[in-house]
Image (cartoon, grey):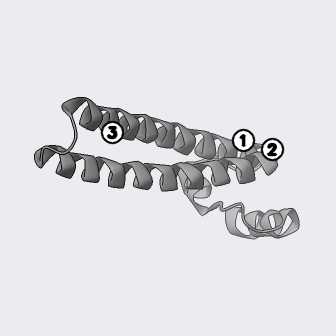
């Protein structure tokens, strides 16, 4: 369960990180078109954005995998529908009861 919580928080961080670098890239593109920054600076902003997207995608995969593992540990079918229903925000008792009611 704790793996799910950690993965969820990491995923939320990388969502915010990607949004931040998206704004930086928009600004860098604008400044480059006005001649206020170099092509190198604009390209560095693109690299940062692409790295952020990559980390976000990886965090999504880790989060999904952690939910699959939790479902397996609880003896519940680890299919896409059950993974999508799982949101590790409740206490362990709440989530276990929810899983027992929703997935059987």
Q: Are marks 1 and 2 in contact (CB under 8 Å)?
A: yes
The answer to whether 8 appears left or right of 23 in the picture is: right
Residues at discs 3 and 2 in contact (Cβ within 8 Å) = no
Residue 73: percent from left, percent from top: 80, 44
Say which residue appears at 66% left-offset and 54% top-offset: 9
Which label's residue is closer to the chain start, 3 or 1?
3
* Residue 8 horizontal/vertical position (percent): 65, 53
Number of the front mark, 3 or 2: 3
Residue that mark 2 sits on: 73
Q: Secondary structure at mark 2?
A: helix
Q: Is residue 13 above or below residue 55?
A: below
Residue, disc 3: 45
Mark 3 / mark 2, whichever is N-terminal: 3
Q: Nearer the viewer, residue 23 or 65?
A: 23
Badge 3 marks a residue whose secondary structure is helix
Q: Residues within 10 Å of mark 2 (few under 14, many from 20)?
A: few
Which quarter of the figure is the C terminus placed in?
bottom right
Residue farthest right in this picture: 93
Circle 1: element type: helix
Residue behind mark 1:
69
Which residue sits at x=74%, y=63%?
Answer: 99
| Gap in angstroms between the C-alphas marked 1 and 2 | 6 Å
């Amino acid at each position: 369960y704790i793996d799910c919580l950690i993965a969820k928080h990491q995923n939320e961080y990388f969502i915010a990180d990607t949004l931040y670098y998206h704004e930086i890239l928009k600004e860098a593109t604008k400044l480059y078109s006005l001649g206020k920054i170099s092509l190198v600076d604009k390209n560095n902003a693109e690299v940062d954005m692409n790295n952020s997207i990559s980390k976000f995608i990886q965090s999504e995969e880790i989060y999904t995998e952690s939910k699959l593992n939790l479902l397996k540990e609880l003896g519940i079918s680890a299919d896409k529908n059950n993974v999508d229903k799982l949101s590790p925000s409740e206490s362990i008792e709440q989530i276990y009861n929810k899983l027992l009611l929703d997935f059987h």
